[in-house]
């Protein structure tokens, strides 16, 4: 009798576990690969069957062959290194300054009252519109492009960091202050770890923005870089060469995102 009652009691729990079992299932690694391969196969078939002229949509295999040729001549190295320098410097400067300012704005009320309205009033301005102004101020060269990327990265970083600080449980902050923690230690040991999920959300958003600003600035005011290469081949109607540049941007964006996800897993093991 007792065994029957135990089985009856465990039945609802087993039912609940069965209902939520799909939430614990992990997506296999090959699922993402299969999705990309599926798109490439369909693309290849469309091009091979000439449903779309090759001038407008060359086959992926033809693009890969063209890319290999451009790689052997050194053209890809030259343009990719120029783009990596610009986006790396701009992203590092904009993200680091944005995180620091966001932490300070969220922690110090007087800074919040003075500077937050300024940040939110400048944020909606399209950043690419500032490039001519930066060229006037900083001259023609790498500085205005790096500055433009840094400005574009700064705003998502500072706004998300600010939001993360504001969402920290006040009890944690008060407890740290009560036990004698100085403001710097409160920020470093309490606020920063608690704000990291929102900070990384801003960094991921900034990654796509930085890539967009990189390509746009290179198309407007550069003789090297992936964006400049795409514009040059587009003007010459050399679609396969142009698509090589587009593929490079896709790989660059994917690598950037994977790097941020790896850093997030290392810094937020509890998430």
Image: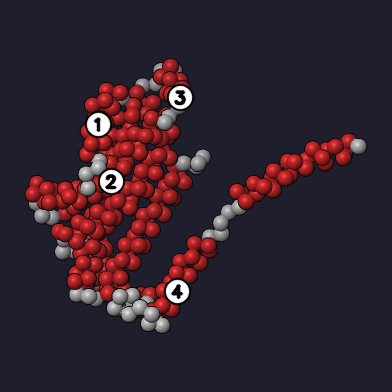
Secondary structure type for disc 4: helix
In this view, the residue farthest toward the bottom is 49
* Mark 2 residue crowding within 10 angstroms, few (<14) / some (14–19) / many (20+): many
Question: Vertically, is 166 above or below 84?
Answer: above
Residue that badge 4 annotates? 42
Name the mark nearer the viewer: 3 or 2.
2
The residues tagged by marks 4 and 2 sit, at their Cα atoms, a distance apart of 36 Å
The residues tagged by marks 3 and 1 sit, at their Cα atoms, a distance apart of 27 Å
Image mark for residue 153: 2
Image mark for residue 117: 1
* Mark 3 residue crowding within 10 angstroms, few (<14) / some (14–19) / many (20+): some
Give the quarter of the figure containing the N terminus: top right
The residues tagged by marks 4 and 1 sit, at their Cα atoms, a distance apart of 50 Å
- N-term-proximal mark, 3 vs 4: 4
* Position of residue 220 measured from the top left corner of the image (x, y, whole percent): 16, 59
Regarding residue 164, the answer to whether it shows in the image is yes
Q: Residue at x 43, y 50 (%)?
A: 261
Question: Vertically, is 118 above or below 133?
Answer: above
Residue that badge 3 annotates? 172
Q: Residue at x 21, y 44 (%)?
A: 125
* Mark 1 residue crowding within 10 angstroms, few (<14) / some (14–19) / many (20+): few
The chosen color scheme is secondary structure
Secondary structure type for disc 2: helix
* Position of residue 77 measured from the top left corner of the image (x, y, whole percent): 26, 67
């Amino acid at each position: 009798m007792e065994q029957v009652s135990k089985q009856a009691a465990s039945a609802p729990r087993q039912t609940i576990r069965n209902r939520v079992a799909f939430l614990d299932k992990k997506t296999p690694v090959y699922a993402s690969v299969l999705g990309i391969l599926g798109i490439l196969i369909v693309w290849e078939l469309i091009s091979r069957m000439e449903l779309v002229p090759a001038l407008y949509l060359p086959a992926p295999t033809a693009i890969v062959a063209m890319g290999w040729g451009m790689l052997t001549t050194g053209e890809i190295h030259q343009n990719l290194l120029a783009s990596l320098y610009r986006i790396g410097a701009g992203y590092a400067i904009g993200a680091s300054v944005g995180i620091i300012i966001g932490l300070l704005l969220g922690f110090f009320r007087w800074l919040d009252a003075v500077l937050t309205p300024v940040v939110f009033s400048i944020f909606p301005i399209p950043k690419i519109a500032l490039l001519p102004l930066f060229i006037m101020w900083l001259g023609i060269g790498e500085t205005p492009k790096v500055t433009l990327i840094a400005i574009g990265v700064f705003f998502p970083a500072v706004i998300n960091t600010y939001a993360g600080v504001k969402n920290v449980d006040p009890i944690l902050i008060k407890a740290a202050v009560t036990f004698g923690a100085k403001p710097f230690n409160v920020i470093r040991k309490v606020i920063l770890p608690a704000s990291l999920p929102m900070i990384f959300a801003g960094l991921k958003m900034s990654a796509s923005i930085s890539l967009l600003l990189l390509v746009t600035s290179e198309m407007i005011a550069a003789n090297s870089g992936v964006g400049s290469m795409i514009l040059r081949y587009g003007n010459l109607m050399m679609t396969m060469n142009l698509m090589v540049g587009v593929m490079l941007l896709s790989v660059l964006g994917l690598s950037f995102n994977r790097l941020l996800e790896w850093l997030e897993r290392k810094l937020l093991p509890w998430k």
